[in-house]
Image: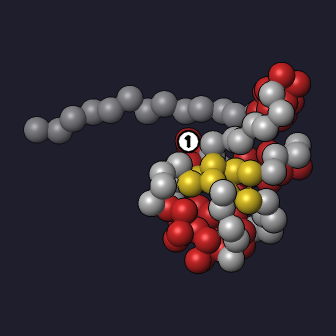
Amino acid sequence: MSIQYNKIQVQVSLENLRHNYRVFRSTCDNVIPVIKSDAYGHGLIEVGQAMEQEGAETLAVGFVNEAVLLRESGCEKGFSPCSAQLMMRISRHCGIMIF
């Protein structure tokens, strides 16, 4: 038996993501974009760089390897784990303190 799945395509506009970030920033002082799971399939590096360029000080990630990939891509901002278990792993692998 084979199961067929829908093939869904999503097109993401980085400019729209940037706009949304700026809207949140206009009402909140500390906005932390959640870009775990490859930015929900939209491109971890691309979205991380766009959010950093918009002024995000911290990016939330779901796995240590995501923080490592972002750091290797040149991201200099802090990372916040989406789970408490990641805190020490990210600190150890990326050489940063997470609070």
Identify the residue position indicated by label 1 in the image: 40
Residue at 48% of width from left, 30% of height from top?
8
Question: Quarter of the image holding residue 4?
Answer: top left
Left or right: 81 as drawn, with respect to 54? left
Identify which residue, 84 or 15, lies in the foreground. 84
Say above or below: 78 vs 13: below
Q: Position of residue 98 (x, y in %)?
A: 66, 61
| Helix, strand or loop status at disc 1 | helix
Say above or below: 25 vs 27: below
Residue at 48% of width from left, 51% of height from top?
83
Say above or below: 93 vs 18: below
Left or right: 71 as drawn, with respect to 90? right
For the C terminus, the image quarter is bottom right
Left or right: 5 as drawn, with respect to 24? left
How are the colours assigned in the image? Answer: secondary structure
Q: How many discs appear?
A: 1
Q: Position of residue 64 (x, y in %)?
A: 53, 66
For the N terminus, the image quarter is top left
Q: Position of residue 51 (x, y in %)?
A: 80, 45
Residue at 69% of width from left, 34% of height from top?
12
Question: Quarter of the image holding residue 19?
Answer: top right
Residue 57 shows in this picture: yes
Q: Position of residue 27 (x, y in %)?
A: 83, 22
User: Which residue occupies the extreme front position in the image?
Assistant: 99
Residue 19 shows in this picture: no
Check disc 1 and give the amino acid type. Answer: Tyr
Identify which residue, 39 or 52, lies in the foreground. 52
Left or right: 57 as drawn, with respect to 7? right
User: Which residue occupies the extreme left position in the image?
Assistant: 1
Count neighbours of disc 1 (C-alpha within 10 A) and say few if under 14, some if 14 to 19, many if 20 or more: few
